[in-house]
Structures are given as C-alpha cells and as structure tokens.
Image (cartoon, helix red, strand yellow):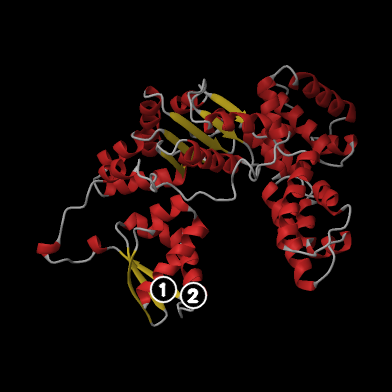
C-alpha cells in the first residue's frame, strides 16, 4: 500500500515541481518506509539528500498528507554512508560520468538549482527600466550564437534579475532540449567546490562544470573574498569562453563595484554585455500589479477590486517588486477571507506594516556614512573643512543625495555638513548635476548609493 501511495504522490509532485526538478531530485529517491509519522527515503548522494531536504521536503510531506498519509517528518539516508557488506559494495560512479549519461536524456538535465515555474518570459512585465535586460536575456534564450559573452545582469533586490535567469533556463530547455544548461547560485557553486575538495573529487567537479553548454550563476558577489573559489571560478569561466559556451551572471552591483572580487575576474566579467536592471518606475510597477491582479481574478472568483487601489500601491511601494507583489497577494487573500471588496481603506488596513516600511525616511547621517564608506574616506573628513579633491567630491555627492533623498532644507543640510552656508550646499549640488551627465562613473556611483540608501 505504501508503494502505491508513493506512486500517486510522485505523479502529483511531477505537476508541482516541474519535469526537470522531478527528474533531478524526486525520481532518484527510493522509498524505504512510512511508519510512526515518519517517511524515510534513500538518496544516491549526500549532496542530493541535503538539497532535497532544503528545497523539496515540504512538497513531499504535503503531497503525502493530501493523500491521507499520517506523516509529519521526512528522513533521507545515503546508503554509501552506511556500513554495507563488502560483497554488495560497488564503487560510486564519478559525477562527470553520471552527467554525461543524463545530460542529453529525455527528462534529465544537469543537477542545478530548482527553477521556479512562475519565472518565465511570459510572466515578466517589461518596462523602460528593464527593457535592455529583457532583450539581452531573450537573445541568449534563443540558444544560438550571441555577440556578447558573458551576459552580466546587475541591480538591487527584487528588480527581476533572478526572474530573467530562470526565464532563460526555461526557454532554453523548451527550444533546445539537447543543450546542457546549468543554473545555480554562487553559494551553491562554492558549496560543490568545497565538497569536491573534501571528497577528493576535484577532477569530477572540473569536468562537470566544463561540460555544460550554458552556465548560469546567480548572485556572483557571494564568492568575493573567497580566494580558492574565485580561482576555480576564473578557470571554469575561461574554459567555457574558450569553447564558445554561453555564460550568464547576475549580481547586486556592477563587476567593478564588487568589493574583494579579484581584478582578473572583474576584467573577464566586463568583457561581455553588462546590463543594469534599474529600479522600477511608476508605469512598470502599475503594469506588474495589473498583470498579477488579472491572475488573481481567476483564482478569487467574484472578488471585487475598486478603482484606484493598484495605482495607490504603485505610488506607495517603490523599491522592491517582491514586496509589491507580496502586498497584492496578501491583499487578495485577506479580502477573500473576510469577504470584503478590495478598497483603498481595506488596503491601508491590511498593508499597514508594508506601507509604513515603504515610508521609511533616509537621514542625512545615513547618507554621510554610506558615502564615506563607498569612497573610503573618514566621516570626520567628509563633514570637516578639508578641500582636497578626494574628499570634496564625495562631500558634494553626499550634499546632492541629502537634497534629493530627504526633506531637509538647504540651511539644515549645511548645518549637518560642518556648519556650511546654504550657498555652499547649492554649489555642491549644481556641480554634481553638471558632472553626472558627462561622468559615467559618477552616474553609476549615484545610482548605486541611491539604491543602497533606499533599500
């Protein structure tokens, strides 16, 4: 009976997690026992066990519970880690050999991070702030040769970088199923590298990562400062580029802005197309909300949405698309539970904490600290009388940001900058406005600092 239950649960899991995730992570599991509220499986490797426990345990328990199984805990063992009689023990197959077998199979891809089925090009709302990133991602997803390698996407949290990465992988799997596509985070790259060192399987690791057709690494800033991982990443990068294999990278800032990232890696990353995914504007936020609301109207039949609610949210929640979408999700769920129309009053009642957080005011002191840190100058010098260029320019940038990110008057800003006259503040602001159009580095610095302060 237990085997039959697991067979039905597997069919449901295939629908829930998608074909690729099912083939990589669920199908290899072997059911051992289901008793006393615990379901036990065996996994082929420790890495697979750890990955399933972190990413799919809730899915498995939920599907089994939905089928009536009294189960509250999941345990996964690894046979090769348990004592086994010598006559039954066989040498584990090298990872690279397993990959060569499965990479071009009908159902299996390389064992990368799970892809979110929601993150496709169809669900990505395009606007002016992200149109270049979207176009570049589309070009890579076509699967043919491109004129830029790597594609480097950078921007703040919740602006769509990971969505585009997943969309590329989904599209490549659909268009070119024969391609070996590997998507994972930089943290997972490091985890696998360290595991390979520990298990003395570094050659398997090298062969695995250098056998792919498309390598996609999310949040590459994570490897900054980790010398051994950076060294292996550098050699993997070079090997794939030499083979004309496509690489897609994302980070929270431009390559040159990632502190403690080796210069040779920064140079390689800057050789391709570097695209900034800008903060959303009002029109894009409203478009995202309208798309999401249409989807929810199908799920919450009969639920009314009053005029002006989406416009209100698009105006008030400005920094993060994830927060924006999460607010709308909560609003629809709340209205459904209490049986009320979604009005402005209901939105303000239901989302009071999100709206309050979105109204957080940036202070002059925060701006001064962040600018001093960014330009590696002492805060006392930034506020003090020194006029050398290396201090005067960051001071003017801090004045400019204070004018545009706070509601303080020019005399008040002057007092916070060592008692300077408001005309000095005006001069500094004008100087930055003159320079930012011609000085690309200054424009990038201003954009980065604004994102960090508003995050």
Is residue 330 toward the left or the right of residue 169 in the image?
right
Q: Are marks 1 and 2 in contact (CB under 8 Å)?
A: yes
**Which sits earlier in the primary sequence, circle 1 or circle 2?**
1
Q: Is residue 294 above or below residue 37?
A: above
Q: Nearer the viewer, residue 11 or 116?
A: 11
At 32% from the left and 61% from the top, the residue drawn is 43
Is residue 213 toward the left or the right of residue 333 in the image?
left
- What secondary structure is marked by label 2? loop
Residue at the farthest left position: 87
Q: In x, y percent, where is residue 263?
A: 47, 26
At 46% from the left and 42% from the top, the residue drawn is 183
Q: Nearer the viewer, residue 329 or 440?
A: 329
Q: In x, y percent, where is residue 182?
A: 42, 40
Count of numbered marks:
2
Q: In x, y percent, where is residue 411?
A: 90, 35
Is residue 17 toward the left or the right of residue 83 in the image?
right
Q: Is residue 201 above or below residue 15?
A: above
Residue annotated with mark 2: 67
**Would you call the spot at circle 1 few (<14 residues within 10 Å), some (14-19), or many (20 or more)?**
some
At 25% from the left and 43% from the top, the residue drawn is 97
| Residue 23 seen by the camera | yes
- What secondary structure is marked by label 1? helix
Q: In x, y percent, where is residue 311?
A: 85, 48
| Residue 363 seen by the camera | no
Residue annotated with mark 1: 5
């Amino acid at each position: 009976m237990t085997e039959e239950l697991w067979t039905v649960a597997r069919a449901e899991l295939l629908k829930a997690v998608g074909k690729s995730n099912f083939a990589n992570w669920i199908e290899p599991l072997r059911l051992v026992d289901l008793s006393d509220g615990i379901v036990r499986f065996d996994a082929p490797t420790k890495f697979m066990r750890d990955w399933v426990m972190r990413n799919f345990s809730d899915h498995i328990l939920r599907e089994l519970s939905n089928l009536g199984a009294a189960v509250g805990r999941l345990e996964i063992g690894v046979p090769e880690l348990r004592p086994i009689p010598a006559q039954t023990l066989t040498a584990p197959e090298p990872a690279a050999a397993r990959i060569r077998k499965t990479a071009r199979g009908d159902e299996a891809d390389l064992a990368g991070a799970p892809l979110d089925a929601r993150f496709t090009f169809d669900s990505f709302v395009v606007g002016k702030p992200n149109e270049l990133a979207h176009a570049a991602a589309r070009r890579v997803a076509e699967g043919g040769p491109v004129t830029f390698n790597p594609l480097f996407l950078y921007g703040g949290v919740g602006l769509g970088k990971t969505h585009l990465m997943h969309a590329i992988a989904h599209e490549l799997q659909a268009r070119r199923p024969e391609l070996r596509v590997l998507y994972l985070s930089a943290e997972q790259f490091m985890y696998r590298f360290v595991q390979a060192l520990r298990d003395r399987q570094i050659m398997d690791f090298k062969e695995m990562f250098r056998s792919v057709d498309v390598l996609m690494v999310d949040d590459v800033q994570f490897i900054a400062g980790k010398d051994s991982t950076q060294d292996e990443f550098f050699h993997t990068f070079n090997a794939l580029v030499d083979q004309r294999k496509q690489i897609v990278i994302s980070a929270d800032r431009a390559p040159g802005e990632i502190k403690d990232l080796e210069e040779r890696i920064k140079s390689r990353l800057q050789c391709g197309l570097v695209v900034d995914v800008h903060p959303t504007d009002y029109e894009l936020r409203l478009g995202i909300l309208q798309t999401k609301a249409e989807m929810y109207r199908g799920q919450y039949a009969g639920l009314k949405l009053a005029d002006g609610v989406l416009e209100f949210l698009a105006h008030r929640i400005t920094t993060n698309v994830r927060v924006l979408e999460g607010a709308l999700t909560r609003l629809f769920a709340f209205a459904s539970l209490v049986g009320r129309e979604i009005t402005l009053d209901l939105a303000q009642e239901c989302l009071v904490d999100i709206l309050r957080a979105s109204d957080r005011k940036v202070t002059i002191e925060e701006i001064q600290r962040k600018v001093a840190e960014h330009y590696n100058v002492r805060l006392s010098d930034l506020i003090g009388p020194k006029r050398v260029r290396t201090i005067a320019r960051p001071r003017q940038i801090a004045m400019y940001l204070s004018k545009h990110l706070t509601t303080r008057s020019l005399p008040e800003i002057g007092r916070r900058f060592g008692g300077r006259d408001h005309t000095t503040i005006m001069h500094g602001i004008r100087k930055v406005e003159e320079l930012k159009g011609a000085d690309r580095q200054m424009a990038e610095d201003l954009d980065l600092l604004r994102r960090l302060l508003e995050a």
